[in-house]
Image: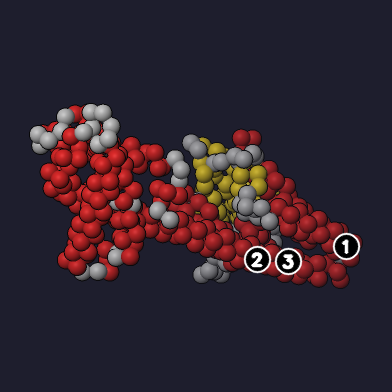
Amino acid sequence: MYPILAHKRALPLYLACWMPNAILMATLFVFSGRLEWIPAFALALPMTLIYAFICLSAWYLCRYFPLQEINLFRLLAVHVVAAFFSASIWILIGNALVTLLGSLPLMSPLPDNYRYLIPILVIVGILLFLLSAAVSYLIIFFDKSRKYEKRSLELQILAQQAEMKALKAQIDPHFLFNSLNSISALTSIDPAGSRKMCLLLSDFLRKSLSLGAKKFITFEQELELISGYISIEQIRLGPRLRIDMMIAEDTKQCIVPPLLLQPLVENALNHGIRHLLEGGEIRISAEKREGRMRIAVENPMDPDKPSSKSEGIGLDNIRRRLQTIFAHEGQLDCIESENNYRAVITMPARTL
């Protein structure tokens, strides 16, 4: 269906746009010396409205002969023939209209003078039809462009959702595998600790699965999750693992992707604390400044530990999630010195 006919509110606006044509046509009738102003307007107004509907056919013609799929000269010939045919039909309808109006007072000059107005009607009819065809091509172009943009956006959203699901699915088994290894190691040396760890792990998994299904959670909820994870690790590492949190209050209601901190803390444990005989302190800080949120996880390192060429699955996962959600506004920077490792996340500070 023609776009204008598909929207009831668009039709009156479309007809209103044709009113200047009625004024122009009436003026031509008067300056031709054949009609006075009243009969000129009496003829021009209904003739314009009739031709407004006839010119709607140009849209269907434009759909059948796309600009990019037909020779330009052939296209022009098709539209000129169609314009002449439409103008001819319009003039025949006008003849019937003139016969009807001629019976009214003040309209008696119309039947005798109509044949002298036909050349004007032919020229105006052809030009208006060609103009309607040009507008129709513009409508078709913008409609295709809008649909293409909408489809591209839908595909982008679907791709982001698929990637996020894949990344979340990647985190869960990775963490679970490491936790089960820890429980297995404890069963022989600390059965009570392994039982407690099982309970903590069960509670953590329940919360992480519940919150992990959401696109965003508050940073306060993320801190509760990471506290549960740290409690699990402290059973195995004991006093070797110490935590220092410096969290600004205005960051707690900011929204973050779920399970954002767990891979950072896990990385700090696996590549820092566990390689130190005396253990060490993991420092977690968060602040909000100028509309951006900055989260840092810092840990000591053994300077003699062999350097790893890869950042690991956890950090790569975070980086890809931030890029997927925030594009260039979200990033993860890792700074490694001789005795220290620092991972810093920066992203927009948003609230629910």
Colour approach in the figure: secondary structure
- Residue 335 x %, y %: 50, 55
Q: What residue do we see at 62% from left, 63% from top?
A: 165
- Which comes before the other along the chain, label 2 or label 3? 2
Q: What amino acid type should be assigned to the residue bearing mark 1?
A: Arg
Please, which residue is most extreme toward the front here? 103
- Front-most of residues 265 and 314: 314
Q: Quadrant of the N terminus?
A: bottom left
Residue drawn at the location 61% of the way across and 56% of the way down: 264
For this rendering, which residue is in front, 105 or 120?
Answer: 105
Q: Nearer the viewer, residue 217 or 307?
A: 217
Residue at image mark 3: 176
> Is disc 2 in contact with disc 3, using a CB cutoff of under 8 Å?
no
Q: Secondary structure at mark 2?
A: helix
The disc placed on residue 109 is none
* Residue indicated by mark 1: 195
Gap in Å between the C-alphas at discs 3 and 1? 16 Å
Left or right: 259, with 85 as reference point:
right
Q: Residue at (81%, 55%) from the top-left corner?
A: 203
Q: Percent position (x, y) of residue 251? A: 61, 39
Q: Quadrant of the C terminus?
A: top right
Give the labeled residue for mark 2.
169
